[in-house]
Amino acid sequence: QKEVEQNSGPLSVPEGAIASLNCTYSDRVSQSFFWYRQYSGKSPELIMSIYSNGDKEDGRFTAQLNKASQYVSLLIRDSQPSDSATYLCAVSGNTPLVFGKGTRLSVIA
Amino acid sequence: ETGVTQSPTHLIKTRGQQVTLRCSSQSGHNTVSWYQQALGQGPQFIFQYYREEENGRGNFPPRFSGLQFPNYSSELNVNALELDDSALYLCASSWEDQPQHFGDGTRLSIL
């Protein structure tokens, strides 16, 4: 059973701080890694994809991948109240996307 | 705005009934995947269609079935509805194995 684990939270950070979201996965052959943001009552929105070890930055978001440790993370710099949402980690290899349950982030103004 | 559209937005059915959900994929996308998301859970993969053929199936019973049409739009059919089928049903489209983009979903309630 391929699994993706995330801390369900809630993770509370003050406005302007760095939010750090973590994800581990069980399938060593996984090749593609994604972070989706989901606002309450809405559908998931793709915010980052990463395929190789290291860091990938896009605006205030940085995704980090360590395949040896089977670990993916998402950093959100200068967190804003509008970042408050559930963040879903998703992983795929030779199989379709497997999602974690998501981490709920609350940014406090 | 992903360009993936789903209908209807909301649906209420009773146990034992059948339902058809529809999805129009983003222009240029040839792959459609369907997911079920229960409250407080991550999306669970139901199946994927690639160029009108089923290309993978998750751990869902045969009463969950689907189709993909030549224009790459898709349907999800669920027979003999059960209370546990109440969920948000998400359609995602992509080109080949590129990242998937989700529609707004259909919220299905079973009474």
Image (cartoon, coloured by chain):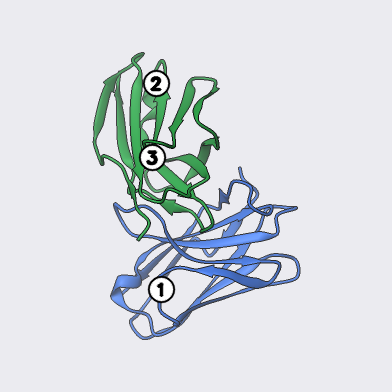
Chain colours: A green, B blue
Could you tell me the amino acid type at mark 1?
A: Phe
When asked about the image quadrant of residue B81, the answer is: bottom left
10 Å crowding of disc 1: few (<14), some (14-19), many (20+): few
- Which percent across, then down, holds residue B58? 45, 68
What secondary structure is found at the residue carrying circle 2? loop
**Circle 1 chain:** B
Q: Nearer the viewer, residue B24 or B61?
A: B61
- Which percent across, then down, holds residue B60? 41, 73
Closer to the eye: label 3 or 1: 3
Which residue is labeled 2 in the image?
A80
Which residue is labeled 3 in the image?
A70
When asked about the image quadrant of residue B44, the answer is: bottom left
The residue sitting at 35% across, 80% down in the picture is B14
Establish whether labels 2 and 1 are both on one chain. no
The residue sitting at 59% across, 71% down in the picture is B75
Closer to the eye: label 2 or 3: 3
Establish whether labels 3 and 1 are both on one chain. no
Q: Nearer the viewer, residue B32 or A98?
A: A98
Is any part of residue A43 visible from this angle?
A: no
**Circle 3 chain:** A
Could you tell me the amino acid type at mark 2?
A: Gln
Q: Going from the N terminus, do you reach mark 2 or mark 3 first?
A: 3
Specify the quadrant that holds the N terminus of chain B: top right
Specify the quadrant that holds the C terminus of chain B: bottom left
Is the Cβ of the residue at disc 2 closer than 8 Å to that at disc 1? no
- Which percent across, then down, holds residue A72? 40, 35
The label on residue B60 is 1
The residue sitting at 53% across, 40% down in the picture is A46
Is any part of residue A84 visible from this angle?
A: yes
